[in-house]
Image (spheres, grey):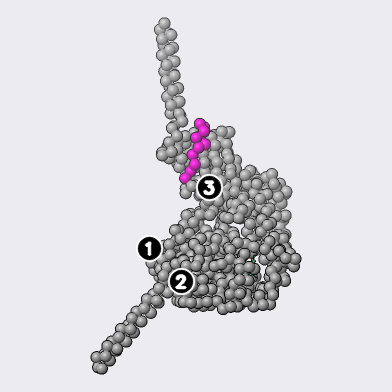
Amino acid sequence: MGTKHWIIMIACCLFIIACKKSADLIEDTTLFGGFTKPANFPEPSYNFANNTITKAGFELGRNLFYEGRLSRNNTISCGSCHMQSAAFTQHGHDVSHGIDDRLGVRNSPPIMNLAWNKAFMWGGGVYDLDLQPIVPITAHEEMDEQIDRVMDKLSQLPKYQQLFKAAYGSAEITTAKLMKALSQFMLMCISSDSKYDQVMRKEQHVAFSELEQEGLLFFREKCAACHTEPLFTDGKFRNSGLLPSEIDDQGLYESTLNVTDRYKFKVPSLRNLRYTAPYMHDGRFLTLDVVLAHYDHQVADLPNLDPFLTQRPGLGISLSPSERQALLAFLNTLNDEKFINNPLLAEQ
Amino acid sequence: MNILKNISLLLLLAMSFLACTNKSDITPDFDQTKLVPFSVEFDNIVGDRILSINNTATPYVNSKGEAFSISQLQYFISNIKLTSTNGKIYTVNADSSYFLIKGADKSTRFAKINVPEGDYSQLTFTLGVDSLRSTMDISKRTGPLDPAGGMSEGMYWGWNSGYIFFKLEGTSAVISNDTNGDPTGNKKFRYHIGGFGGYSTPTINNIKLIDIDLTKAGIARVRKDRKSNVHLFVDVMKFFDGNNAFSIAEHPTVMFSEYSVSIAKNLTEMFKHDHTEN
């Protein structure tokens, strides 16, 4: 009896130790596992050959992303408009809210799965993630700062001298190092753990409910032409028939001046919609119900309206109440709680 | 006999002299491995006056009779190419072929490069930053191409990735205070010309190839000990008064727009070869 007790006790101890070890291990990998392509995703389009992601580079990038010194008066960081809890959007703001309470003209999009993005911004103009941060840093209504002044400010702080040294072997700061570190952080903002992903990867017997399954079928028929799986965007610029806004934002046209690009906006991903309201390029719709109502009966007959939306007499996409219900259930499977709670991506 | 002999001797002597002088001026072999210093000078003028920055007291006057002063002039020169008198072409290595000329800083007026020895009768360069460089990895954008410059001095468009390659700013009393002019009341004009053709979707392309014939005002005899310099006059007045002349009052601000295509055509008329210092 006594020995049996001992054996059980020792076994328990071993078990606890083993558990603790594996928990430690899990934590280590969530802390930094490098860039791994989710099994159900295509090959990324970002050119990693020119910017290998390292732990030190990523950590530098994370510090920069949450650094107020990137703005003129040190008050606004990238994270002010791209908040993790809102899937890196500026929740509750139709258009962005920047330095000195200045308002922008567009809704802050999520920093999410950008390694698969070929074009940035609602209206394009930027086609390389490494060049993207120059825009908010120098924009009058966002951070209103100059890159060379940012580099000056950072180079005076021992913290950044160390971080740059760790990442690049020297404390010297250049535009390229600054931009590429920011890219490293943003590239690691991968959302691939929604229920949808688990079903697609056939993980742990996760399955769609009947309603969700029905919604998926409607989705593939009515939405996937533009919101293509698994990223839920085809990365293209399209005119979805939204009436031009008061300021007459013409989307892609503003950066190409081609008349055929008038009122085309980048097709956004539909992942994490639960956290990213309001919707559309200017945040005009507060709920998904209104978005669906738009597709069903508010699509405007604009020049360049996407051909997919001109296939029925009343324009748009017919969505009966029961179809809407199923669609919403399906869209709800695209929310990724792990992404918005991932400690790796949080301000430290 | 003697006289004849003497004459022929003299002739011989004379000929050998001639040969000698000829020899020292014989075009050297075109050897791309032996490069020597050469420069192109961009001497900024406005009509018949030397460019002076902030010349509010003595303004320039364009052909429409509008008086103006200049507060900033900057432009990019790139991809310099030389053609020799015997038709050989030398293209300067792309990495050493980008120059930002600043009107306010005379030290920037030379594009200093290295080329093979030779006699050159034609100079070609780009006004602007070509699409290859405009879409290159950020780590290759150093020196004048570093987008870090501030907004006022900056020659980089972040929101529409690319370089402003000709920037001219100044003031003119003819500019109105409403939104068609300068609502701040500062009477400022701003011409920011860019557009290299676009990353993935085609956009306007205002890059200009400038071809300069050097035979009229002196070919460049590039030799290792001479530091040959091609001296160009860059007449900013042509930007206003060229074939597509325009009025400052009507167009005080031109940036990324269709209209920029029209006035950018004037840019090619600005460059004139004045002389060569050999």
Residue behind mark 2: A63
Please give the name of the residue rendered at 57% of the width and 36% of the height, measured from the top-left corner. B213
Tell me the chain of label 3. Answer: B
Mark 2 to mark 3: distance in Å? 37 Å
- Quadrant of res B30: top left
Is residue A302 at least partly visible in the picture? yes
Same chain for labels 1 and 3? Say yes or no: no
Q: Are marks 1 and 3 in contact (CB under 8 Å)?
A: no
Q: Position of residue B57 (x, y in %)?
A: 65, 54
Quadrant assignment, res B169: bottom right
Q: How crowded is mark 3: few (under 14 residues within 10 Å), some or many (20 or more)?
A: many
The crowd level at tag 2 (other Cα within 10 Å; few <14, some 14-19, many 20+) is many
Residue at the outermost top position: B1
x, y percentage for residue B27?
A: 46, 30
The three-letter amino acid code for the residue at tag 3 is: Ser
Mark found first going from the N terminus, 2 or 1: 2
Q: Which residue is drawn at 29% across and 89% down?
A: A9
Q: Which numbered dot is residue B78?
A: 3
- Horizontal and vertical percent for residue A156? 43, 68
Which stretch appears magenta? B83-93
